[in-house]
Image: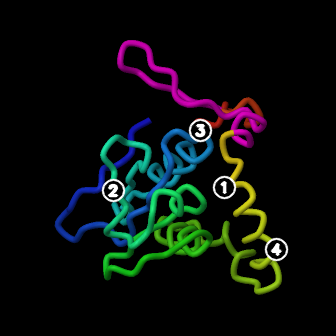
Amino acid sequence: MSLKKDSTAVSGPQLTLYYDGNCAFCAREMGRLSTWDKAGKLAFVDIAQPGFDPAHLGASMEQLNREMYSLTAEGKVLVGVDSILAAYPLVGRGVLVWPLRVPLLRTVLTGMYRQFARHRYTMSRLLGYKLPECTDGVCGVGNPFLRDGGKS
């Protein structure tokens, strides 16, 4: 799985997502967003990479490990479901996050998101996600619960 690096294009990404590459579910979802991102509006940074420093986000690694952070092109830091709400519309999939726009549902789903984030490694395993297995430079990851193995 290849994710676009946090690089600058002519116009640059509109949103940079900071995710835990050691979390199979998280890495898979960032891969899915990357695939949908035909216009290059998103950039991805793996916070599990050696030397990553979250200081520019005004957050600690402990905070980044509790919730996903993102950074807009204007320099605004978004946390948790706000990152999700910003990312999906940029790749033309805003309809997938409509429940997060309903106040009562947002409250419930935010709590669920925080619990999932705290237990993401266990939840990834329980949901059947695995980190990519690489052979001869070709990596693959799948989900046994999805018809195509989670490759779309």
Residue at 77% over, 69% down:
111
Q: Secondary structure at mark 4?
A: helix
Give the Cα separation between the discs numbered 2 and 3: 21 Å
Alpha-carbon neighbours of circle 2 within 10 Å: few (<14), some, or many (≥20)?
few
| Left or right of 73 in this view: 140 | right
Badge 3 density bin: few <14, some 14–19, many ≥20, Cα 10 Å: many
- How far, Cα to Cα, is label 4 from label 1? 14 Å
> Residue 127: image x %, image y %?
76, 38
Q: Residue at the far left: name it.
A: 10
Residue depth check, mark 1 versus mark 3: number of the one nearer the observer: 1
In front: mark 4 or mark 2?
2
Which mark is on residue 117? Answer: 1
- Foreground: disc 2 or disc 3: 2
Nearest to N terminus: mark 4 or mark 2: 2
Amino acid under disc 1: Ala
Residue in front for this viewpoint, 130 or 38? 130
Q: Which residue is mark 4?
A: 108
Disc 4 or 1, which lies upstream in sequence?
4
Residue 125 counted in the magenta span: yes
Q: Image quadrant of residue 147?
A: top right
